[in-house]
Image (cartoon, rainbow, N blue to C red):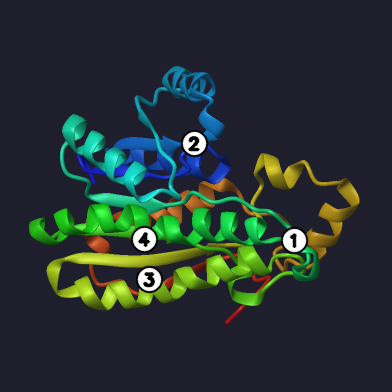
Amino acid sequence: MKNKVALVTGGMGGIGTAVCQYLARKGAKVVASYNRGGNHASAKAWQEEQKKLGYDMAINFVDVADFQSCLSMVKNVEADFGSIDILVNNAGIICDVQLCKMDLSQWQTVLRTNLDSIFNVTRNVISGMLSRRYGRIINVSSINGQKGQFGQTNYSSAKAGIHGFTKSLAQEVARKGVTVNTISPGYIETNMVMSVDDKIREKIVAQIPVGRFGKPDEVARAVAFLAAESSGFITGSNLVINGGQYLV
């Protein structure tokens, strides 16, 4: 994937950072999109930290829940680096609450950020991929999009919707050299997971057959595999990365 342009939404989180780094090591020109509540200083600090580690990655602010913001981001990336060859739809949020206590904004915010964003970004990238007859799209779902999770009707619904999006789009674009796949991580060793109380983490690990949390780099390796030119016969698939916690 040398010299391929890769856009990674939510590129500054635990999984997003690992994906950006892995794709960069494979030779891609990586653009990490971010929101961070409009904290541009924080985003620039992340960029500088990556430079110190040897990764020269571009950054671009976006509100993935807003179609026009996504359109502007794609235009900016294409103007600066050329056509987008690889798209990793990784942006997402959680807002956990039981449905009987959930208000409309808690439902809509999660759906817009986690599912509408897949349309908002992909719609603005797909035409270019089709015209060039090449593209790799990897959508990041979750184990909870497959099995559900207490207090996550909003999150699980959005993540489950990604599977339908992936399978349908994969059929539409397969003959034009564009592949569309999903990955479904389980519990990964990110700051968010590791900030959970020790006793709760112990209970989670007890449910994982391999006996540990996954590492962000293990997810990134899977993304890079699906993003490779040599993976052109894999499309419409879901790659499960959960240590055996949930098998379908």
Q: Name the residue under label 1.
A: 211
Residue 24 at x, y percent in the picture: 34, 36
Mark carried by residue 113: none
Q: N-terminal of the two: label 1 or label 3?
A: 3
Residue type at numbered disc 1: Gly
Q: Mark 3 points at which residue?
A: 166
Q: Mark 2: which secondary structure?
A: loop
For discs 1 and 4, the disc positioned in front in the rendered view = 4
Task: Kindly report the distance in space between the C-alpha atoms of the residues bearing marks 4 and 2.
Answer: 17 Å
In terms of image quadrants, where is residue 74?
top left
Residue type at numbered disc 4: Phe
Task: Kindly report the distance in space between the C-alpha atoms of the residues bearing marks 3 and 4.
Answer: 10 Å
Residue 54 at x, y percent in the picture: 40, 22
For discs 2 and 1, the disc positioned in front in the rendered view = 2
**Where the C terminus falls, by quadrant?**
bottom right
Q: N-terminal of the two: label 3 or label 2?
A: 2
Q: Pointer 1: residues within 10 angstroms few (<14), some, or many (20+)?
A: some
Q: Pointer 2: residues within 10 angstroms few (<14), some, or many (20+)?
A: some
Q: Do the residues labelled 2 and 1 touch (CB within 8 Å)?
A: no
Q: N-terminal of the two: label 3 or label 4?
A: 4
Q: N-terminal of the two: label 2 or label 1?
A: 2
Q: Going by the picture, which residue comes out furthest to the bottom?
A: 248
Q: Looking at the picture, tell me which residue is in the foreground, 40 or 31.
A: 40
In terms of image quadrants, where is residue 172?
bottom left
Q: Mark 4 points at which residue?
A: 119
Residue type at numbered disc 2: Asn
Residue 243 seen from this side:
no
Task: Kindly report the distance in space between the C-alpha atoms of the residues bearing marks 2 and 1.
Answer: 34 Å
